[in-house]
Amino acid sequence: MTSENAEPDLSTTLALQPPAKTDAGLAPLLLTVIELVRQLMEAQVIRRMESGDLDDNDLERAADSLRKLEEQVVSMCEIFDVDPADLNIDLGEIGTLLPKEGNYYPGQKNQNPTILELLDRLLDTGVVVEGDVDLGMAQLNLIHAKLRLVLTSKPI
């Protein structure tokens, strides 16, 4: 067999190419969750800044960290060939996961709030969720969990 007819090593060729959109797997979902958390943290930084709870040094560090995290999300979107706009999931009648760019400021009331806005309000006011979870099979309760979750942005 001559070198002209030799087939290229597919493992080397595939390793050099970024994954196709269909090969991104859970990456878009993970990036969506990271972006949701990033925007929630940004909203909390704004709330604390406005209430005077952050000094200039804290605000500078928080802004720098948020900027770096946003850059990383954009970089990961490029790696997995995901359009950053696609991270905002449309949940039908519920609305969207994230607000449109520049369309939300913490504390502002919106007639059709996004999931981010609702979570931001919950963090600002605080909420306690309690419940029991039973996991089992074949009509046998195998795992029982008693849950109590306190979700707030305020120190407890």
Image: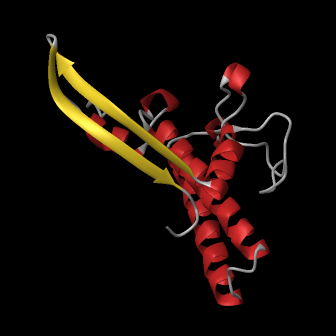
Task: Give percent across and percent down for residue 118.
Answer: 68, 43
Task: Give percent across and percent down for residue 141.
Answer: 16, 22
Is 30 on the left-hand or right-hand side of 83? left
- Quadrant location, the N terminus: top left
Front-most of residues 31 and 123? 123
Is 138 on the left-hand or right-hand side of 120? left
Give the mark count.
0
Front-most of residues 48 and 20? 48
Q: Can residue 5 be seen in this view?
A: no
Front-most of residues 100 and 83? 100
Q: On the image, which quarter does residue 125 sit in?
A: bottom right
Tell me, what colour scheme is on the image?
secondary structure
Q: On the image, which quarter does residue 49 sit in?
A: bottom right
Is 78 on the left-hand or right-hand side of 52? left
Task: Give percent across and percent down for residue 73.
Answer: 56, 54
Front-most of residues 150 and 33? 150
Query: Would you place residue 39 above or below residue 33 in this image?
Result: below
Task: Give percent across and percent down for residue 55.
Answer: 69, 87
Is 127 on the left-hand or right-hand side of 96? left
Residue depicted at x 81% and y 50%: 104
Residue depicted at x 49% and y 67%: 156
Q: Is residue 134 visible?
A: yes
Query: Would you place residue 105 above or below residue 5 in this image?
Result: below
